Amino acid sequence: MNLNMDLQTALIVAGVVFVVLVFGYNQWQIRKARRPRELSPEDDLPPMREPVVGHSTAPETAARLHEAAAEQPPRREPTLSQASARAGAAAVTDNNHVAAAAAAAASTADADEAVAEEVAVAASHAQAGEAQAEVVAAPAPAPAPAPAPAPVAAVPDGQPAPAVVDPLIDCIVPLHLERKASGDRILPLTGRLRRAGTKPVHIEGLRTEANAWEPVTAGHQYEDLQVGVQLANRGGPLNALEFSEFVTAVESLAESLDASADLPDMSETVANARELDGFAAGCDVQLGVNVISDGAPWSAAYVQNVATQDGLVLSRDGTRFIRYQANAEGVQRPLFTLQFGDTNFLRDDLTVKAGRQITLLLDVPVADQAAKPFKTVCEYGHTLAQRMGAQLVDDNMRPLTEASFVAIFSQLETLYNKLEARGMPAGSSVTLRLFSN
């Protein structure tokens, strides 16, 4: 009897340990968030892997995932011409030239090249001591030109217009209703379909009168539904536990609505999630430039005053200031951030906290490419260096030279092309979702 009890107890303990190990492994996978890496001139961006497409993937989704990128025109390397050198030298003596150069460069076909030349030349003069300026709080810089509207993807004839759910980053489950259902009936049944683990879930309905998908809304009638769970974000790929949680909630909704659900294969979905996460990890780049004091340290109160007067907005957690810029739809999106060491501007004593380094950080995939964010970061950093008696350097504390600017512009172009070829231009709504937390 005791032997049987000991054997039974050992088996129970072994089973519990196995379950804990499996659960712990999956939690480790979930918490292993992608951390945006820094981009330096010596980096080589990894090649993009092909998406995994299985038998259960819809033909239109497979075609979209494997659609070849449009042929790109040959890229021209930035060069330092005599005319741009004169323009760069003028920037040293005229504090308003940077904003004017931004507008002029944005209106030409060689905008990036022109700005790279001007910033590089101005930075080299500043290092030589020709751009010393009195440390004063400057007025907010002139707003950058509005970006051109993003091209709208064509919708095939007869196909409903898309809403939020996108086959590029979502696992989509169609729900076929026996009869029309109202949003008032559907919404109370969707309480479990907000998130699956760390992945957002979206529910959309098809309105025949508009021939378009939309988030389920009270008062509207729907012919069909679709539910999408995001395959990856900065928290990592969708894993088996999250997929199971999602499928269970979808089955419950389908049963409540007398609907049939086309459930995907778990192994294929998880493989697609891992492939997408691998692609995103290769594009998750942060690019920073630093403003280093040539003299005494700055107080945090002084840095806060400068950032506020320049129109930057303090983040909710108080750790950074954010420069916002409106996109093509007029929505304000973060363009870059300003950080002052580990200073928390809400909790720290700003009169005591001090330092000699300000970091301007660009989150490359989430900043709208049309706004030329790196150009804006460099121009703003250069004006800060002039006004605060400082110099502009990279993360290795080396002065930013023309060669480093050219290398960074080249790598940014490669990264932008890589995102574009995948159907996720930098700053687009689908890219913002993929590179969210």
Image: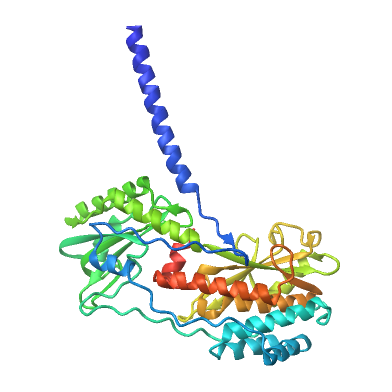
Residue 8 lies, in percent from the top left, at: 34, 17
Q: At 64% from the left edge and 85% from the top edge, which residue is drawn?
A: 142
Note whether residue 290 is visible: yes
Quadrant location of the N terminus in the rendered image: top left
Position of residue 37 relative to residue 101, above or below, is above
Position of residue 372 relative to residue 226, above or below, is below
Note whether residue 137 is visible: no
Q: In the rendered image, which quarter is residue 44 located in?
A: bottom right
Residue 119 lies, in percent from the top left, at: 68, 81
Q: Nearest the camera: 379 or 298?
A: 379
Outermost residue, top direction?
1
Q: At 45% from the left edge and 46% from the top edge, which residue is drawn?
A: 29
Q: At 44% from the left edge and 84% from the top edge, which residue is drawn?
A: 149
Q: In the rendered image, which quarter is residue 186 located in?
A: bottom left
Q: Is residue 257 left or right of residue 411?
A: left
Q: Nearest the camera: 402 or 95?
A: 402
Q: At 43% from the left edge and 80% from the top edge, which residue is drawn?
A: 72
* Number of marks in the rendered image: 0
Q: Nearest the camera: 261 or 271?
A: 271
Q: In the rendered image, which quarter is residue 290 located in?
A: bottom right
Q: Is residue 101 left or right of residue 302?
A: left
Residue 152 lies, in percent from the top left, at: 37, 80
Coloring scheme of the render? Answer: rainbow
Residue 92 lies, in percent from the top left, at: 77, 85
Outermost residue, right direction?
296
